[in-house]
């Protein structure tokens, strides 16, 4: 056979750039209720179809349909809606505070609130999440102190982390929220190791790891999958596919022509692809994965299909690389609107209650910000004492650090 053409390198591109409307047909969506629900004991190879389809529960009318429709109480639905709304309001207020130069940096989770809010409902006390910087809904669902979170963002004198972490990189052990690592994909290896340790100690706690679609291209992702499979670690491996890394489309990380969930199947891990904007689907899939982990049935990888509605961070301008109105056309919609519609249909929620909750949460967050600002903001320089950098590093401070601390105190006349 004669070859009469030169080789070409394929570089993936999104279906639209600024000035054009995105064609979302690449998502390969499935109708609500269509995906089957396998038993917990299923072999990973026997559910490969679920790594390519899309688990959905809420249909266009807001009704729960299909085998994945969960047994969930009105109280849990109320809690989920409240957590999502609280996350969105908090994000909006902190974004404004950053623009006012009260904090240096912020990352919001606009459009992704359902994933953490629903997932948190199936975790038990003592379970540990290994998050990235867009899982604040986990904290909102667990009612972590808003004052502490805002103080961390402002790196002020009441910052629980003493100014040692970038804003939004929280650490809340009592809420099962491991210290966020800015080096992405490390969360997966950390979570698998923690889960393995839990099993070695004959404990009952499971781990839940979080990364985005872009970070699946990191080596840590593949290392974690290998260890999770080999040792059947009790861990949930969450890949939040919000279509964009900082400014690169998800296909650059390998999402073109396949799915991120498919990588788990290839490693011998039960894997699901789920509508991340469907609160009920998130709850059901999270519950299924958590029960597998607690039953010594091994890890589960879940690809949450969602959309990053806002900028990557306050340092980003997404209008430079994607259509400005993309989120308005995203076929999976707004997770808050979808859950509200479902609750209205059940007769357990009203528009008046929605408005009242919005007002209540806005007041709650405004009051927390007011209290946090009494400890200082980036504008007034109320930051942790420089000497605090020597604390919490060694049990017994070595001589060279004691000398450096002495010099620092001498320079400041202490």
Image (cartoon, rainbow, N blue to C red):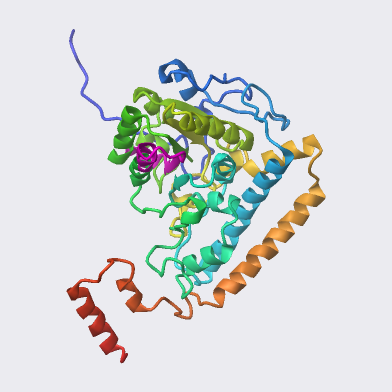
User: Is residue 147 in view from this perspective?
Assistant: yes
* Front in this rendered view, residue 49 or 158: 158
Q: What stretch of residues is rendered in magenta? A: 194-217
Query: Residue 74, percent across and down?
Result: 73, 40
Residue 278 locus on image (x, y percent): 61, 35
203 vs 128, nearest the viewer: 203
Q: Left or right of 335: which side holds 135?
A: left
Q: Is residue 29 above or below residue 148?
A: above
- What residue is shown at x 54% (from left), y 62% (from top)? 95
Question: What residue is rendered at 26% in x and 89% in y?
Answer: 410
Q: Is residue 406 above or below residue 293?
A: below
Looking at this view, is 174 or 360 the one in front? Answer: 174
Q: Is residue 52 visible?
A: no
Judge whether residue 197 is colored magenta: yes
Residue situated furthest front in the rendering: 202
Residue 43, by quadrant, is top left
């Amino acid at each position: 056979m004669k070859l009469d053409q030169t080789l070409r390198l394929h570089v993936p591109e999104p279906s639209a750039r600024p000035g054009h409307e995105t064609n979302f047909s690449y998502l390969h969506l499935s109708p609500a209720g269509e995906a089957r629900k396998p038993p917990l004991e299923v072999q990973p190879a026997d559910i490969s179809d679920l790594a390519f389809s899309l688990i959905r529960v809420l249909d266009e009318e807001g009704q729960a349909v299909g085998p994945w429709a969960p047994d969930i109480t009105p109280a849990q639905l109320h809690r989920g809606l409240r957590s999502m709304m609280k996350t969105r309001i908090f994000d909006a207020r902190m974004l404004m505070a950053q623009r006012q130069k009260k904090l240096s940096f912020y990352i919001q989770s606009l459009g992704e609130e359902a994933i953490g809010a629903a997932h948190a409902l199936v975790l038990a006390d003592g379970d540990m999440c290994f998050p990235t910087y867009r899982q604040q809904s986990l904290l909102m669902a667990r009612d972590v102190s808003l004052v502490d979170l805002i103080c961390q963002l402002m790196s002020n004198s009441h910052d629980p982390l003493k100014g040692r972490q970038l804003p939004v990189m929280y650490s809340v052990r009592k809420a099962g929220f491991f210290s966020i690592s800015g080096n992405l994909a490390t969360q997966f290896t950390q979570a698998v190791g923690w889960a393995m340790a839990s099993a070695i100690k004959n404990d009952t706690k499971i781990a839940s790891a979080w990364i985005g679609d872009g970070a699946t291209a990191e080596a840590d992702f593949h290392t974690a999958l290998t260890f999770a499979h080999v040792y059947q670690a009790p861990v949930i491996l969450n890949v939040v596919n919000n279509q964009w890394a900082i400014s690169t489309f998800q296909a650059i990380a390998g999402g073109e022509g396949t799915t991120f969930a498919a990588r788990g199947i290839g490693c011998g891990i039960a894997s699901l692809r789920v509508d991340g904007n469907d609160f009920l689907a998130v709850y059901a899939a999270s519950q299924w994965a958590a029960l597998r982990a607690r039953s010594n049935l091994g890890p589960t990888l879940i690809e949450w299909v969602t959309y990053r509605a806002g900028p990557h961070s306050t340092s980003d301008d997404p209008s430079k690389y994607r259509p400005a109105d993309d989120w308005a056309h995203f076929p999976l919609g707004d997770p808050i609107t979808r859950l509200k519609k479902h609750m209205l249909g059940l007769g357990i929620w009203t528009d008046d209650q929605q408005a009242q909750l919005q007002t209540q949460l806005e007041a709650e967050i405004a009051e927390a910000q007011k209290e946090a600002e009494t400890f200082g903001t980036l504008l007034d320089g109320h930051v942790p004492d420089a000497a605090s950098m020597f604390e919490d590093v060694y049990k017994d401070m070595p001589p060279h650090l004691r000398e450096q601390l002495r010099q620092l105190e001498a320079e400041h006349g202490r």
